[in-house]
Every structure is written in C-alpha cells, then in structure tokens.
Amino acid sequence: MRRIPRLIVFAFALALAGCGDSATDGPPDEGRVTNITDGDTIRVQLNTGPEEKVRLIGIDTPEVHGRGGLRECFGKEASAEMGRLLPLDTTVRLEIDAEPRDRYGRLLAYVYRVDDDLHVNLEMARRGFAAPLTIPPNVAFADAFVEAAAEARDASRGLWSACGGPDKPL
C-alpha cells in the first residue's frame, strides 16, 4: 500500500476545516504570523481561516513566562530573535511530522519563511537561541538540530556564551 505524505494529509485536513470560509487566499499549509509568544511558540493565521498556536518542533528556548513564573537566562533574547526572524504578518509555511499536536493542543510544526524558505526552527538553533529538544515521534530533523546547537555552543553563540547553556533560571 502506498503511503500519502503527511504534509499532503495535513494540507487536505486544513482545507476541509476551512470549507465555506472566505479566508482561503492561498495554500492551506501557509499563513501569516500574528503573534510571537516566545522563542519557540508563535500564533499563525492560516490561509484556511483558523488561527493556530504553533510550537516549533525540535527546539527549546529559554522560558520567559513558564510554570510558576519561571524565567530563564536568555529567554527575552530568544523571544526577540524569533520576532526578528518572523516579524508580524510574515508569511510562513508549516510542515508537521508524525504527531500534529502536543498535549496542550498546540500545532507542532517545522516553520519556514515563504520569502526565502528559511527553516526557522533550525536557524534558532544555529544562532544559539535554542537547544535541541527531540520528542519522538517528531524526529525528522533531530540530527540537524543537535548539530546546529553543537556548532553554536562550540562558537559560544547566544545562550551558550550568555548563560553557559540552556535551562538556567534567572
């Protein structure tokens, strides 16, 4: 039996979700950034209509407003970097992996800027604003994230120089 690529299934499901909606201006797997929550979570208004809270797969950035008010070293900087990479109204393409949502209902995605096809998840790790976070079964780019973060650490970029590594409370 031939398998249908997950992105096609995702795009079809989003298209069905938007049936009858007048906001279908482009591909269903694309949308525009409406909010930056923090360094690894954004909001995207999909072309099919619904706004989604999107958690970037494969990376973890320092917390700016975590459980119990937890704030971590370099959290504000990681959030600001996400804002520089994805200014509001930036058109993005979302690709999902094996598991489309987390336990909080957020859409899990690899995020690409449509203008230049920049893989934002990977760029955050490469620039030193994110550590790798592999949660199976979403592992398509796990090795690339580990490699990019290791290069950032070895070059003392971002949180690796400012904090000595991830998960450092303020």
Image: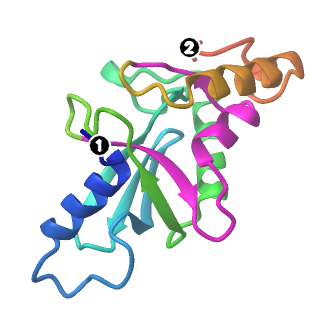
Write the residue at 62% across / 16% down: 166
Along the line of sight, the residue nearer the viewer: 122 or 78: 122
- Residue 11 in view, yes or no: yes
- Determine whether 46 is above or below 23 in the image: above
Q: 155 left or right of 32?
A: right
- Determine whether 115 is above or below 42 in the image: below
Along the line of sight, the residue nearer the viewer: 151 or 88: 151
* Helix, strand or loop under label 1: loop
Write the residue at 30% across / 42% down: 3
Is residue 54 magenta-colored?
no
- Determine whether 166 is above or below 75 in the image: above
- Whole-angstrom CA distance, mark 1 to mark 2, is 43 Å
Number of numbered labels in the structure image: 2
Picture coordinates of residue 48, whole percent (x, y)? 25, 73
Is residue 109 magenta-colored?
yes
Picture coordinates of residue 160, whole percent (x, y)? 76, 19
Picture coordinates of residue 4, whole percent (x, y)? 30, 48
- Picture quadrant of residue 51: bottom left
Along the line of sight, the residue nearer the viewer: 141 or 40: 141
* Helix, strand or loop under label 2: loop
- Residue reaching furthest left? 20
Labels 1 and 2: the sequence-earlier one: 1
Q: Amino acid at mark 2?
A: Asp
- What range is drawn magenta here? 106-135
Q: Which residue is mark 2?
A: 167
Q: 141 left or right of 22?
A: right
